Image (cartoon, rainbow, N blue to C red):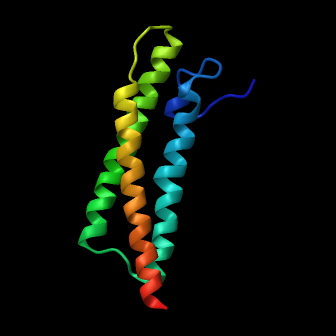
């Protein structure tokens, strides 16, 4: 059995939501922003409006990770608690803000050609 590394792997017991916390944070928190740096370097799309979208993205990302962790702990402890509403709100904030950031990038790229 493989060992999990990171915050999500601390309570790792089989397949629970905790097993995907580290991957979500890595991909949505680091890889997404590394790609934004490359795009910003070429197209200079970040303005005050995009900064607001990125603040909401951070809020959605961190709330998503918190809810993933809570849901995973609930699964490990075999409690019967539903966090579906907050979990859905976190994903909604994350998705909507990502959508607006990507639309801003598309518009900037379209304007540069």
Image mark count: 0
Q: In front here: 105 or 73?
A: 105
User: What residue lies at 40% left-to-right and 45% top-to-bottom?
Assistant: 61
Drawn side of residue 4 relative to residue 55, left or right: right
Depicted 8 relative to depicted 99: above or below:
above
For the N terminus, the image quarter is top right
Picture coordinates of residue 89, whole percent (x, y) = 34, 37
The residue furthest bottom is: 113
Depicted 62 relative to depicted 49: above or below:
above
Q: In front here: 42 or 113?
A: 113
Depicted 84 relative to depicted 54: above or below:
above
Depicted 70 relative to depicted 109: above or below:
above
User: What residue lies at 45% left-to-right and 28% top-to-bottom?
Assistant: 69
Drawn side of residue 72 relative to residue 13, left or right: left
Picture coordinates of residue 14, whole percent (x, y) = 65, 19
Picture coordinates of residue 71, whole percent (x, y) = 45, 23
Drawn side of residue 15 relative to residue 87, left or right: right
User: What residue lies at 42% left-to-right and 57% top-to-bottom?
Assistant: 98
Q: Quadrant of residue 87?
A: top left
Q: Quadrant of residue 55?
A: bottom left
Q: In front here: 20 or 101?
A: 101
User: What residue lies at 46% left-to-right and 51% top-to-bottom?
Assistant: 29
């Amino acid at each position: 059995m493989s060992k999990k590394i990171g915050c999500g792997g601390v309570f790792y017991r089989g397949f629970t939501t905790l097993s995907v916390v580290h991957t979500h944070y890595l991909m949505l928190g680091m890889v997404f922003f590394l790609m934004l740096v490359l795009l910003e370097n070429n197209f200079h799309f970040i303005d005050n409006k995009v900064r607001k979208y990125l603040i909401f993205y951070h809020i959605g990302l961190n709330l998503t990770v918190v809810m993933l962790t809570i849901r995973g702990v609930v699964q490990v402890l075999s409690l019967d608690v539903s966090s579906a509403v907050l979990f859905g709100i976190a994903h909604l904030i994350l998705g909507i803000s990502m959508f607006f950031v990507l639309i801003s990038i598309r518009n900037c790229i379209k304007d540069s050609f």
